[in-house]
């Protein structure tokens, strides 16, 4: 596959997207212009010939070609307005454009009358353009030069002559110093200004020639169209970067290029939906994870504020090997906590606990995940418990409490597996539940933490008994809205045992679990070094993973029966 190389002007031209064109026809000989009438034609597949590029809705376009709204407004604003403006583009073409402008104004009534007649017969969308001696605007150098000047006019306000372009490395007649391709680059802040805070010297920061500018604009357009993805109220641009100069004849390069730029986005995303990572709907990172480390990606999170842009987060040089590690962690969590492909893990799980006003914390976690930077567990717990407590008030009737706790567990496991949270574990008394703690309890590195987890499971067993016998769970009130401290949690165990006995439901499995909790409490540190958020998090984790605790208890009971 060969990559099509567009010229500078071709990259700037846009497709007007209308099926017909109304053309004002002129002839020119020795600098004298004559109006020859108008014509209507179907626009061909080669839309370049009309030299169309949309401008301001209230101003002119970058050429006298425009989409027709009402003929009189389009003619006056977009055609006459353009010729009036273009006369200042170059001294060499000033006379040329002035002559056409004068003819258009002199013949305005006749031209508009003929255009109206044809447009009424057409009864379809059309653009308005010009031809001179049968030539389209694209084939007339004066119009092309004026087109390029007007496109670059604003950027040329800050420029220098006979300087080296920072992109192509060549000395060019003109380089600009203030591109408008990305709106976050401004010169009104000290950090962007070189030359002693003299804006006129700021071109030294990033001098770019006009040719390279068009390639940068084309790159931005392609990225916007193909590689912009929604991300839970935010959006990001995925910018690929080849670490080594790409070989266009290399099969891997061709496949990557085809995947990133050529394929239909909807088809690609539908195919990859099952293994989505960044969102539940769209993702291409899984495919990139299979590429050798000859390609890196940048993730740019941008926020648009009116006409300006602000970088919320820039994640640079994410290698495919890192993406592979993250997908491995994702699959591990899904297989451990969910069955039959339900609830595939994605960043939405994290977003659940870091939404709205805490966007910056959410992006901090995203950055840490991709760059494998450590996060502090207490920092995460603060926001997780805040969300979990909101649903706890309706835990008796609302299943979202269960799902939200399971999401929190999934997040912790994912961050552990991806190397962002330190995996602790060990440093505690041996327990019949060691296999469970080995998988789910890497943060539970002390006996008191493990006791709290198991107490949460025993409490959930009591709540299930109450639900069966009373169709309600009054014991939830004893959990103090999940703001229990050390004293409260130590006093909870006898209350749970007593209630189970009252319901005549204190079975051998409950007794074994209670004995395990008591032993862990007795061998715990004298002074617990654990926050209220952490304490209650381990407790709700035990409630949520009660089935895992039951599996171990019942397996022990069956083994005992078989031995007898």
Image (cartoon, rainbow, N blue to C red):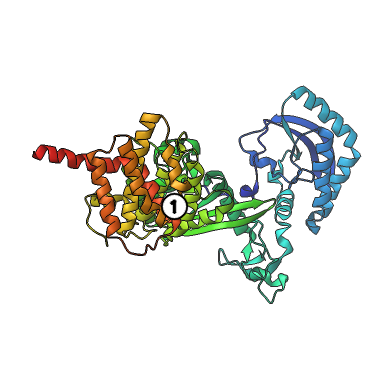
**Front position in the image: 495 or 473:** 495
Local crowd at mark 1 within 10 Å, few (<14), some, or many (≥20)?
some
Q: Position of residue 292 (x, y in %)?
A: 35, 54
Q: Is residue 169 left or right of residue 36?
A: left
Q: Nearer the viewer, residue 326 or 259?
A: 326
The residue beneath circle 1 is 484
Q: Position of residue 518 (x, y in %)?
A: 28, 53
Q: Nearer the viewer, residue 271 or 252?
A: 271
Q: Is residue 481 left or right of residue 456?
A: right
Say which residue appears at 64% left-offset and 55% top-offset: 309
**Looking at the rendering, which quadrant does residue 14 occupy?**
top right
- Position of the N terminus, as image quadrant, is top left
| Quarter assignment of residue 118 | top right
The relative height of residue 511 versus residue 114 in the rendered view (above or below) is below
Instruction: Name the residue rendered at 74%, 24% in the picture.
Output: 122
Instruction: In this rendered view, identify the residue nearer to me: 315 or 464.
Output: 464
Whole-percent x, y for residue 52 in the image:
69, 43
Is 69 located above or below residue 439 in the figure?
Answer: above
Q: Label 1: state its secondary structure.
A: loop
Q: Is residue 241 visible?
A: no
Is residue 356 found left or right of 200 in the rendered image? left
- Locate the C terminus by quadrant: top left
Task: Determine if residue 63 is in view.
Answer: yes
Number of residue marks: 1
In this view, which residue lies farthest toward the bottom?
196
């Amino acid at each position: 596959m060969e990559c099509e190389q567009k010229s500078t002007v071709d990259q700037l031209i846009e497709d007007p997207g209308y099926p017909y064109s109304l053309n004002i026809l002129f002839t020119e000989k020795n600098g004298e212009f004559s109006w020859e009438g108008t014509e209507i034609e179907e626009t061909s597949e080669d839309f370049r010939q009309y030299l169309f590029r949309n401008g301001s809705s209230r101003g002119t376009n970058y050429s006298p070609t425009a989409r027709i709204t009402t003929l009189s407004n389009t003619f006056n604003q977009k055609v006459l307005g353009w010729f009036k403006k273009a006369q200042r583009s170059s001294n060499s073409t000033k006379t040329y454009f002035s002559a056409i402008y004068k003819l258009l104004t002199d013949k305005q009534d006749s031209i508009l009358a003929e255009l109206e007649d044809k447009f009424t017969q057409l009864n379809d969308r059309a653009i308005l353009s010009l031809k001179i001696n049968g030539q389209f605007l694209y084939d007339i150098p004066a119009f092309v030069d004026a087109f390029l000047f007007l496109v670059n006019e604003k950027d040329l306000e800050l420029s220098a002559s006979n300087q080296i372009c920072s992109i192509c490395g060549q000395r060019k007649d003109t380089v600009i110093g203030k591109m408008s391709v990305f709106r976050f680059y401004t010169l009104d802040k000290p950090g962007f200004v070189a030359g002693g805070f003299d804006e006129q010297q700021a071109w030294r920061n990033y001098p770019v020639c006009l040719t390279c500018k068009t390639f940068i604009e084309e790159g931005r357009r392609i990225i916007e169209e193909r590689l912009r993805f929604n991300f839970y109220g935010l959006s990001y641009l995925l910018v690929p970067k080849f670490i080594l100069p790409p070989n266009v004849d290399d099969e891997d390069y061709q496949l990557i290029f085809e995947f990133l730029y050529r394929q239909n986005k909807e088809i690609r995303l539908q195919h990859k939906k099952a293994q989505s990572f960044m969102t539940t709907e769209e993702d291409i990172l899984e495919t990139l994870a299979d590429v050798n480390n000859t390609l890196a990606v940048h993730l740019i999170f941008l926020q648009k504020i009116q006409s300006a842009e602000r970088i919320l987060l820039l994640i640079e040089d994410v290698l495919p090997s890192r993406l592979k590690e993250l997908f491995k962690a994702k699959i591990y969590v899904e297989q451990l906590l969910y069955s039959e492909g339900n609830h595939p893990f994605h960043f939405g799980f994290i977003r659940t606990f870091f939404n709205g006003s805490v966007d910056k914390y959410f992006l901090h976690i995203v950055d840490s995940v991709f760059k494998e930077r450590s996060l502090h567990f207490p920092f995460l717990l603060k926001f997780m418990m805040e969300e979990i407590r909101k649903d706890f008030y309706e835990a008796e009737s609302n299943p979202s409490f269960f799902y939200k706790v399971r999401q929190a567990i999934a997040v912790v496991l994912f961050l552990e597996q991806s190397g962002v949270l330190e995996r602790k574990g060990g440093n505690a008394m041996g327990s019949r539940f060691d296999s469970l703690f080995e998988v789910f309890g890497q943060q539970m590195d002390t006996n008191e933490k493990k006791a709290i987890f198991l107490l949460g499971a025993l409490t959930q067993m009591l709540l299930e008994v109450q639900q069966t016998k009373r169709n309600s769970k009054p014991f939830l009130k004893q959990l103090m809205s999940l703001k229990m401290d050390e004293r409260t949690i130590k006093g909870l165990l006898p209350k749970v045992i007593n209630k189970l006995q009252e319901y005549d439901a204190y079975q051998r499995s409950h007794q074994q679990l209670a004995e395990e909790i008591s032993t862990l409490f007795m061998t715990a540190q004298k002074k617990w070094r654990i926050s209220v958020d952490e304490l209650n998090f381990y407790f709700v984790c035990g409630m949520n993973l009660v089935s895992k605790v039951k599996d171990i208890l019942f397996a022990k009971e069956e083994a005992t029966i078989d031995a007898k």
